[in-house]
Amino acid sequence: MDVHNNDVGIEIGKNNSSATLAQLVTIIKDQIALGKLIIIINDTLKKSDGASITKSEIRRYNTSYAIAKSIVKNGNPNSKY
């Protein structure tokens, strides 16, 4: 989820480098409403508009999966617990 959403944010920044803060807020809100970001609802990944999402719609899915698998296997090295 984080890798996907970060990619969306980077793309927004690159494509709107001269936008004001207010314009960026509007662009981001529009992307959320259009379901372009990923959220978690009841332990399930969903599009930010609440619709279901498939693996093929997740940006850099393989990278995200590898990170998650490593954390589950080895624990989060940044966690205090």
Image (cartoon, rainbow, N blue to C red):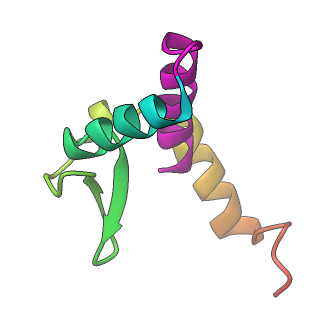
Q: Is residue 64 visible?
A: yes
Q: Which residues are magenta?
A: 1-19
Horizontally, is 17 left or right of 42 in the view?
right
Residue ID at (27%, 37%):
30
| Front residue (pair 36, 4) | 36
Q: Position of residue 67 (x, y in %)?
A: 65, 49
Horizontally, is 52 left or right of 58 in the view?
left
Q: How many marks?
A: 0
Q: Is residue 9 magenta?
A: yes
Residue ID at (69%, 57%):
70
Residue ID at (18%, 52%):
49
Q: Position of residue 80 (x, y in %)?
A: 86, 82
Say which quarter of the image contains residue 73.
bottom right
Residue reaching furthest to the bottom = 81
Which secondary structure type mostly characterizes the magenta part of the structure?
helix
| Front residue (pair 24, 4) | 24
| Front residue (pair 79, 39) | 39
Say which quarter of the image contains residue 79.
bottom right
Residue ID at (53%, 46%):
65
76, above or below 5, in the image: below
Horizontally, is 8 left or right of 32 in the view?
right
